[in-house]
Each structure stands twice: as structure tokens, then as C-alpha cells.
Image (cartoon, grey):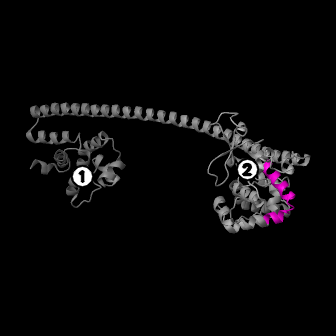
Amino acid sequence: MSESVEAGWPEENWVRLGEQIAEARKRKGWDQQELANRSANSPNTISNYERGRVPRSRRVPPGVIRVQQALSWPPGTVLDVLHGKVREVPDYAQFELFNEYVEVKTSRPRGSSGQDEAGMALRGPGAGSAHLLELPASGPMAEDTFVRRLMRLREAQGLSLKQLSERVAAKGVHIHPHDLTLIANGRRALRPAEADVLAKALGTTVQDLLLADLQEKSSDALRAPSTEHELEEQVRAAEERLFAVSSFMNEAARRLTAAHERLAVAARELEAARNAANAARAVYQDAEAEKADLQHQYTYLLGRIDSLRAAKKAETGQQGRLGQSHTEEKRGSVLDLGEITVGSMLQRGRLGSGLTVEELQKRTRIPAGVITAIESNDFSRLPERGRQAHAHAHIQTLSEVLGMDYAALVKRYDAQEHPGQSEV
């Protein structure tokens, strides 16, 4: 779903949005090129966004929405920042951080040892096997516990955030003091590699910090329960995570509902299309059957007509032989032949083949006007000089396409158009 847009946000809100984009990008360990690749933008566009450059339209560009998606921000986060509702975008991945450290241990019976009772296993980077730990919390709450004790140990050693950052840098990992502040406030996720190096910078381990309240060697500061302020910070961090999870769930539910609606519409459209196709197929099959019946009926009627004319011709010929001379009989015979012309025979052949004049023209390349004239027994459209030869050629072409007897057609044509020649 596309984001709604609104014009007229203050310039400082665009700057704040750019800062949040840059901060989220760095948290993920990406450079501008990486974010550009993941959001289908150019590195120059990402640079403009992070500098807080205000678009000419003063509306949210589509590229910013793609950045929001690439950073795994919930829908509406960009607008919340531009509206001033959110000054710092929390890291919505932080509630998954310590899932890389903590996993449910179910292979050993509960209560087999003091540490097994919690049923939790902590696996740090580079650890060869799982160490069973008793933790008061897992996942995001374990992260809160670790960060709280880490900051207590830092204060006990008299280190500032800047000094801790320098110690970490000496071990090859760069964490800016500002990022340490965000981590301490629960506004930035702590990566497993960062957790290890931070613990080592203070002379301890992740496991020892998480188990400080169970180890006698731990200092009183680490073993002391959370203060009211620390608890309030944990509550605030938990609320932010809960908000993030709720946002994801709401968006997932909305998308699921929309997907179900689209699926239902598609199913109805598919069913309608299937019914329409079946109906069209049935209509076509009925029309095809009707066409075949009409062709059979047409052929039958033509045969009846030919039979009637042949009978009439025989009757006329018999009367001529009884009461007329040989010459008159010949003339009457030619006259009778004219009743069934070569043109009408060709027309019947075309209609019997189910062809139109235009279709016959395409097959024979004889002009439609000439075909129509021939079927009307009008050969005057042919050139006067060599007309008989032209007529023979056209009749031959038409008879081959229509599957008719060329010799019979030419004989009929000559008897009609050149009776003197046919007698010779």
C-alpha cells in the first residue's frame, strides 16, 4: 500500500528524517551504495535523503518509501518523523538480537542442575558448544539485562562512553559514543559481535554479565537489583518494542486481509471467465453443427433442382424429336443447356464449399468483380480479344479451387458462348 502524502513539512523534519535514515543504515553496517541497491535508488539519491534535502514537490518521494521498506521500518514511520511524532526511529530488529545468543534448551531434563533449570542456552560467537545458563529473561529482556550490567561495570571502572568507544576501537570494532548512548537507552540494537567486544573491553564476557546475579565472584554493583530508573528505562524500551511488534502485526494483518480479498476477487473472476468460456464453446459447437446441417440441406436442394431440370430437359428433348426437325432439335438442346449455366454451376460450387466471394478471391487471385460477373454468366468483363482463352483460364482456376470438373465446365461454357464451335 502506498503512503499517503502531505505538503508543507518543516525543513528541520526533513533533516531529522535524513539523520534517522543515515543512523539506521549505519546500524545495519551498510554504506550508501548498499542501501541504494536494496531500495532501488542511486547512491546520490541516498546522499540527498540523508542530507535532509527537501523535494521540490515537498511530498514524500517513492524512493523514500523504498528506503523505509529496505530498513524494515513499519509503514507510516517516514510520515511520523515528518509530522514530528517520532524524533528517533527505534531499531525494530532489536527485539530479535539475543535470539542469536539465547535459545530454548529442551534436550536435558528440567532440574538436572542449577543452571539447567532455566532451560536456556547461550551461544556466543566462536563458542564451540552451548553453555547452559539460568537467565531471568531471554530475547530482548536478556539484552536489557546485559546492557544494564555493562553500563554499571563501565561506571564502576570510571570510564566514559568515549573511553569505552576507544577501548572497543583498539580491538578492531568501531562503535561511536553516540551509538553507545543509543544502546544504553534501548534505542539501538546491540549486535552479537559488538556485545562480545564490549564485554572484553571491560575485562569480562557476555556470559559473566548475564549470569552476574548467580555468581559469587560478581561485584555487588552487578548483582544489585535494577533501580527504579533502570526499570523505567526497561519499561520504556519494552513499550517501544511492543509498539514495533504491534505495528508489524497490524501491517501483516492488513496485508493478509487484502491478500484474501484479492484472492476472493480473483477466484470469482476465474469462475466467471470459466463459465463464459464454457458458454462460448457451447454456442460455437451449436453454430458449427447448424452450419453442417445447412450445408447438407443446401447440397440436397441443389441436387433436387438439378434432377428437376434434367427431367424437364429430357421431356423437352423428347417432344422436340417427335415434332421438330433436326436443326430445331439442336437449337432446343442449346437452349436447354442455357438453363444451367457455367456461372450458376460455379456459384453452387462456391456456396457448397462454404466460401464467400472475398474468400474465393484470396484463393484464386481473381478479382471479386470478375468472379461475381462469371457467376452471373456475364463474361463481358473479360478482355474482348482472347476472351475465350481468358474464360477457359478462369474456369480452370476456379474449378481447381472448388474441386469441380474443369472439362464439363468448359464444355458448358463453349456450348453457351460459342454454340457454333461446339457443334463442329
Disc 2 marks which amino acid? Gln
Judging by the rendered image, the residue that carries numbered circle 1 is: 397
User: In the displayed structure, would residue 4 be above or below residue 164?
Assistant: above
Work out whether residue 92 can be spotted. no
User: In the displayed structure, would residue 188 be above or below residue 350?
Assistant: below
Residue 201 sits in quarter: bottom right
Judging depth in this view, the residue of 80 and 364 nearest the camera is 80
Q: Is residue 156 magenta?
A: yes
Q: Locate residue 148 relative to residue 335 in the image: left or right.
A: right
Q: Position of residue 101 (x, y in %)?
A: 69, 48
User: In the displayed structure, would residue 282 be above or below residue 354?
Assistant: above
Mark 1: secondary structure = helix
Residue range corresponding to the magenta coloring: 145-165
Q: Nearer the viewer, mark 2 or mark 1?
A: 2
Q: Residues within 10 Å of mark 1 (few under 14, many from 20)?
A: some
Judging depth in this view, the residue of 140 and 204 nearest the camera is 204
Q: Position of residue 301 (x, y in %)?
A: 29, 31
